[in-house]
Image: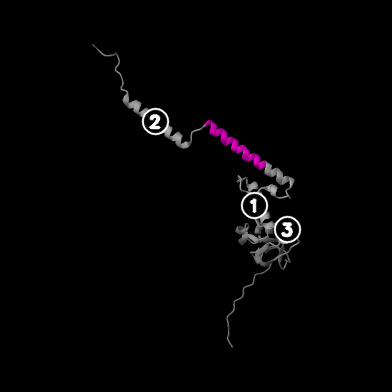
Amino acid sequence: MHNWLIQAKFNRYIPGRPNPIYLPLKMTYNKENKFINKGADIAIKYDGLWFNSYNDEYPAAIEFDPKTANPAHGYRLGELANKLPDGLELHPKHKTQLHNYIVELKVTKDLELEKELEYLQFKKKLKEGETLADEDIKIDDFSDEEPEEKAEREAAKARREAKKAERREKAKKNPRSLKKQLAMMNFKVKEGLFVATDTKPQKKGGNKD
């Protein structure tokens, strides 16, 4: 028989004060996410998280529903923190991880899912105000375009056309490139120095016979 030295440390749970507890995460699903319905692969990044509890009782697990997740934007830790029950908050050790994904969705080889992903990437570019290239996917390829999305697309197109017109007007006013402008400035400076050294100051009163 062996005698082992064991050290145990207990934290007192005091209601009304922040009590750190570790709770597992449990994903629930209410069939509102069309990507999961179509067979997208689900990757769960966290098994559990630390929380601060202020109540007498706390749940055995934290349930969350990733109905807003899509292949371009997963379910973030910050979204979970905003939907916690009263008396429960995310532990400060996770404050720098709010942008980390709890759940990520990965598209399969299904062509329809790939089109949906391209569509979401297109919408993301529109929101960020990026200039779309000609090879970018057209939103007209999708029949489920909403009136707000169409107005947003047309507004983005108008902004791009306005920027192109502004650049064309500037090019008309300043047809020379920057390289040519610098070359012309150097030529004028050299020409001025040559004229200044070539001319000699004349004596006052003219020449005497």
The front one of 60 and 175 is 175
- 173 versus 122 height, above or below: above
Which mark is drawn over residue 56?
none
Q: Which residue is mark 1?
A: 121
Q: Residue at x 70, y 47 (%)?
A: 140
Disc 1 element:
helix
| Distance from the alpha carbon under mark 3 to that under mark 1 | 16 Å
Quarter of the image with the C terminus is top left
Q: Main secondary structure of the magenta part?
A: helix
Of labels 3 and 1, earlier in sequence is 3
Residue 101 image-quadrant placement: bottom right
Rendering coords of residue 194 (x, y %) = 34, 28
Q: Secondary structure at mark 2?
A: helix
Percent position of residue 192, x then y: 37, 28
How dense is the environment of label 2, judged by Cα within 10 Å: few (below 14), some, or many (20 and up)?
few
Q: Is label 3 in a helix, a strand or a loop? A: helix
Residue to which mark 3 is pinned? 34
Q: Crowding at label 3, few (<14), some or many (≥20) Cα neighbours within 10 Å?
A: some
Q: CA distance from mark 1 to mark 2?
A: 52 Å
Local packing at callout 1 (Cα closer than 10 Å; few below 14, some 14-19, many 20+) is: some
**Depth order, front residue of 8/182:** 182
**Which amino acid does the dot numbered 1 rest on?**
Gln
Pick whichever of labels 2 and 3 is earlier in the sequence: 3
Q: Earlier in the sequence, mark 1 or mark 2?
A: 1
Q: Which one is in front in this view, the residue at disc 2 or the one at disc 3?
A: 3
Residue type at tag 3:
Lys
**Circle 1 or circle 2, nearest the eye:** 1
Residue range of the region highlighted in magenta in the rendering: 155-173
Q: Magenta includes 167?
A: yes
Residue labelled with disc 2: 189
